[in-house]
Image (cartoon, rainbow, N blue to C red):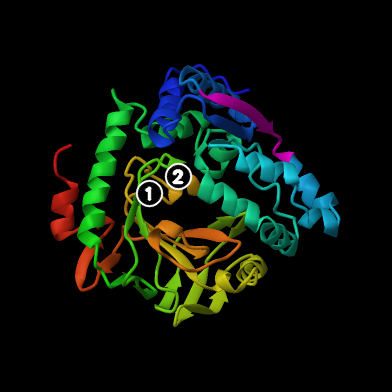
Amino acid sequence: MLNYYDKDPRLEKWAEVIVDFCTQVQAGERVEITGEIQGEPLMLALYKRCLERGAFPVLRPVFSEAAEIFYHTANETQLTDVSPVSIFDAENTQVSLHVLAESNTRNLTGIDPAKVSKVRKARQHLSRIRKETIRWNITSYPTHAYAQDAAMSIRDLAELVFSAGFLNRPDPLKAWQNLREKQRVIAAMLTGTRTFRVETKGCDLSMGVEGRRICESSGAVNMPDGEIYTGPVENAVNGRIKFSFPGYFMGQVVEGIELEFKNGRVISATADSNEVFLREMLETDEGAHYIGELGIGTNWGVTRFTKNLLFDEKMGGTIHLALGDAYRETLGENRSAIHWDILHDLRQGGRLYADAEVLIEDGLFAGRFADAWNRPD
């Protein structure tokens, strides 16, 4: 068990932000709290806070190695089985809180990608119930595995987590409310945008968004958070992008992903490493060939790439594109068993246009968007 921060008073602030602000747990609600056992200190803080709110929390710790055992051992029937108990739990839970706390982020590296795709397809209905009927939030607890991935000490990673969650501030809930208000202003300014265009070295990609909703995310489903996002029109993505960061998905790492789109669909996909996995994920279903989300990171408390997508996709000055399923609130229509976010940097010579207007340049909001963003809290 880690001992640097497992008694840190900021854990109580963290739990308060998730329970009171992010998911707004109410008295009488049934709450599931899941996560790997290394996240025990935060899971217990969440459990305590839910009880204080008058809810009925249930702790469900999981073992990181279980997924590896499942994929290595399960037969075809077991791979595609969906437990009726899981369906019942989903239908009778109001709030789900998950603490990522892996001891080995590469547990699934040797797993056949086709098995991963098969399981995700089989559980698509269950995933839809959980996404659309349960208020949920995912957070990430610092572990040695995450610290090693980020090439950081466990202390430095913990401090990055607390900083990105605004947990060092006197009133974290107020800080998150301020971020939410700023993001809503920017989202309102972008309402009516017809096309976003990304320009960086080796990338020129346009995405039509006419009729789609510009949304903001400030803690409702992730903590830490900070992004503005939308769902591109399915047949209106054209051009090429070579992602500046590796893609991480289901325990796999894919370096140097380059995609070309025509009328929305991926027509060329290459990678410097693990290209087989990239292609397997694209073949999950037809929707996996299309972009389900364009996200703009707005959390400058995330100061470096950690190889933990929960943090990285929120990094101020970056965007991310998701292959696959679109979020319903954006009015996106693409449907897929996968939603794979891949990160791209705009901080060194990159531009993001909203129609003909520069929205982001060199990783910072530009023009009138900068004026709106930088207003005093």
In the figure, 268 relative to 108: above or below?
A: below
Is 129 in front, or is 312?
129
Q: Secondary structure at mark 1?
A: loop
Q: Is residue 62 magenta?
A: yes
**Residue 132, can we see it?**
yes
- Name the quarter where the N terminus is drawn: top right
Point 62% across, 42% down: residue = 90
Q: Callout 2: 10 Å neighbours few (<14), some, many (20+)?
A: many
In the figure, 241 relative to 46: above or below?
A: below
Q: Amino acid at mark 2?
A: Phe
Residue 257: image x %, image y %? 52, 68
Point 39% across, 60% down: residue = 330
- Is residue 143 found left or right of 72 in the rendered image? left
The magenta region covers 55-65
Q: Callout 1: 10 Å neighbours few (<14), some, many (20+)?
A: many
- Which residue in the structure is indicated by mark 1? 315
Residues at circles 1 and 2 in contact by the CB criterion of under 8 Å: yes
